[in-house]
Image (cartoon, rainbow, N blue to C red):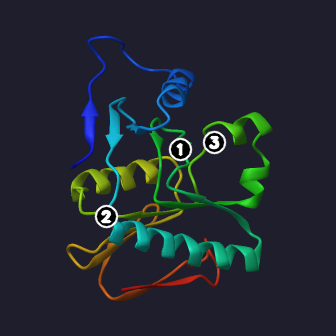
Amino acid sequence: MTAIQLNLAPLIQHLTAEQFYELCMANKDVVMERSATGELIIMPPVGGESGEREANYITDLNIWNRQTQLGKVFSSSTVFRLPQGGDRSPDAAWVSLERWQALTPEQRRKFPPLCPDFVLELRSESDRLKPLQNKMQEYLTSGLQLGWLIDPQNQKVEIYRPHQEVEIFALPATVSGEDVLPGFRLEIE
C-alpha cells in the first residue's frame, strides 16, 4: 500500500495550519501529512523490517543526543509545520536546543512551526522513491541543514545539504552528522 494523496480543492482551497491540526486530532488513528502545495497525504503503516530499522536509527540518534544534550530528538509521529508550507513527519528528526527553546509552550505542544535541523527518511516497502526525494527538497527549502534518505531497496543513501547537490552512497555506509550533529556517526546496513 502506498501513500494516498487527496485533492481537497473541490471542497476547500487550502486548509489553514489550525484546520489541519484539528483534522489530525479528530482522526488520530490516521497518519496524515500535507505537502507544501496543499495535498493531503494519508500515510500507510510500515512493516516489521522498516519499523525495526527506524527504531534502531532513532535509538542511535537519541543515545548521541543524551550524551551531548545539544537538542531534541523526534519520532515519526511528530508533525512539523514547515516555514515554506507543508506539514511533514520525518521518520526521525532533530532540532537544536536553542531553536526548540525559542518556541512557546503552545508551539511545542501542537505541530512545531519549524523545520528540523536534521531529518532521516527511511524508504519502506510501501514508499515510492520520487515522493520521498520531493519531501527532502521541501525540507531543504524550509531550512533543513542535513538530511539522510535511506533507500534499502536500491541499496543507497542520499545526503541532502543546503545549496549542494545530493550526494549518493552505496550501502552499507557510515554517514556523519557533520557539523549539524557533531560526533554522530550512523552505520547503515
Badge 1: few (under 14), some or many (20 or more) residues near its Cα, within 10 Å? many
Q: Marks 1/2: CA distance?
A: 18 Å
Q: Is residue 130 left or right of residue 33?
A: left
In front here: 106 or 96? 106
Q: Which mark is residue 112?
A: 3
Answer above or below: position of 127 versus 188.
Answer: above
- The quarter of the picture where the C terminus appears is bottom left
Q: Indicate the amino acid at tag 3.
A: Pro
Badge 2: few (under 14), some or many (20 or more) residues near its Cα, within 10 Å? many
| Point 62% across, 74% down: residue | 181
Q: Secondary structure at mark 2?
A: loop
Q: Marks 1/3: CA distance?
A: 7 Å
Q: Which mark is residue 123?
A: 2
Pinpoint residue 179: horizontal percent, then vertical percent: 61, 76
Q: Is residue 167 left or right of residue 27?
A: left
Q: Is residue 14 left or right of residue 57?
A: left
Whichever of callouts 2 and 3 sits on the residue coming sooner in the sequence is 3
Whichever of callouts 1 and 3 sits on the residue coming sooner in the sequence is 1
Q: Indicate the amino acid at tag 2.
A: Arg
Q: Secondary structure at mark 3?
A: loop
Pinpoint residue 148: horizontal percent, then vertical percent: 42, 69
Whichever of callouts 1 and 2 sits on the residue coming sooner in the sequence is 1
Check disc 1 and report the residue beneath it. Answer: 79
For the image, the number of numbered tags is 3
Pinpoint residue 147: horizontal percent, then vertical percent: 46, 65
Q: Is residue 162 left or right of residue 75?
A: left
Answer above or below: position of 105 versus 159.
Answer: above
Q: Indicate the amino acid at tag 1.
A: Val
Q: Marks 2/3: CA distance?
A: 24 Å
